[in-house]
Amino acid sequence: MSAPRAGARAAGAPDLALVRRARKVHRLLAAHYPDARCELDFTSPLQLLVATVLSAQSTDRRVNAVTPALFARWPDAAALAAADRTELEEVVRPTGFFRAKSDSLLRLAAALVADHGGEVPRRLDDLVRLPGVGRKTANVVLGNAYGVPGITVDTHVGRVGRRLGWITTEDPVKAEHELGALFPRRDWTMLSHRLIFHGRRTCHARRPACGACPVARWCPSYGEGETDPAVAATLVRTQGRA
């Protein structure tokens, strides 16, 4: 059997041209969104975990309005696990689906107390075993509370990644692996933030501002949205919404 030629791609590896284009686009997004970050307010891993659970089908702004009172009333996992359900439901009501979210928080806090001494674990495998915690939530906590690189595939990351031609699937786990193959691990967390910022501010689901997009030249989906620069500029949001 002959040896592989120099520069040949390993089986299943992404195309080199795609990798180069994706990394160039990422650099441009980094320059365009220098303030990209997690937009949920938190001061501890537990606070971020709770806020991320509450952010489902809600906006970060609404969650940030609710969590100060929640954390003041129940400052740790033990207190939250012992919370009165009715009182907790009233606090989280503005985030929507308040009964289901209250149930998730009570079960999550109880599991943290029973299995992890009230602390949020630092391993993906441990996090996803917690009630109501999937890979997306786990990667948010790992990347932003513990500095462990992870790709958070939410609706924005999935949409923008597909429009840019980086991923081909709508399955979040498969998309996470496809994106991870294009970028060095050290970039994963900030990549997620920049794609989320871009999705919230420019590359909208219904009417993307293609004519005001900083990476339009490298986007195979250019033209799905408004291409007139002046009109597109009016669609750009200065502050994102979940």
Image (tube, rainbow, N blue to C red):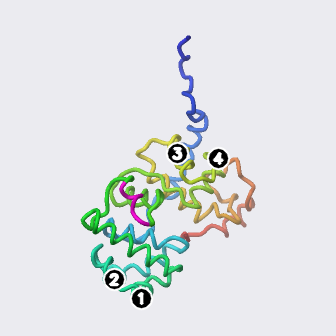
Q: Amino acid at mark 2?
A: Ala
Q: Nearer the viewer, residue 169 or 85?
A: 85
Which numbered disc, 4 or 2, marks the residue that appears first in the sequence? 2
Measuring from the top left, give residue 239's x and y in whole percent: 54, 71
**Which quadrant would residue 85 be assigned to in this image?**
bottom left
- How many other residues sit within 10 Å of disc 2, few (<14), some (14-19) or many (≥20)? some
- Give amino acid for label 4: Thr
Residue 127 inside the magenta-drawn segment: yes
Question: Dot 2 lies on which element?
Answer: loop
Tag 4–tag 2 contact (CB < 8 Å): no
Q: Which residue is denoted by mark 4 in the rendering? A: 168
The mark that comes first in sequence, 3 or 2, is 2
Q: Residue at x 61, y 45 (%)?
A: 166
The dot on residue 86 is 1
Q: CA distance from mark 3 to mark 4?
A: 11 Å
Label 1: state its secondary structure.
helix
Contact flag, marks 1 and 4 (Cβ < 8 Å): no
Q: Nearer the viewer, mark 1 or mark 3?
A: 1
**Which portion, as a residue range, is magenta?**
126-131
Verify CB contact (< 8 Å) between mark 3 and mark 4: no
Q: Which mark, by number, is residue 83?
A: 2
The x and y percentages for residue 79 are 28, 79
Residue bearing mark 3:
177
Residue drawn where x is 50% and y is 44% of the image: 180
Tell me whether the residue at label 1 lies in contact with that at label 3, contact meaning CB atoms closer than 8 angstroms: no
Q: Amino acid at mark 3?
A: His
How packed mark 3 is, by other alpha carbons closer than 10 Å (few <14, some 14-19, many 20 or more), is: few
Residue 67 vs 119, above or below: the answer is below
Q: Left or right of 34: which side holds 144? A: left
Q: Which mark is residue 176?
A: none
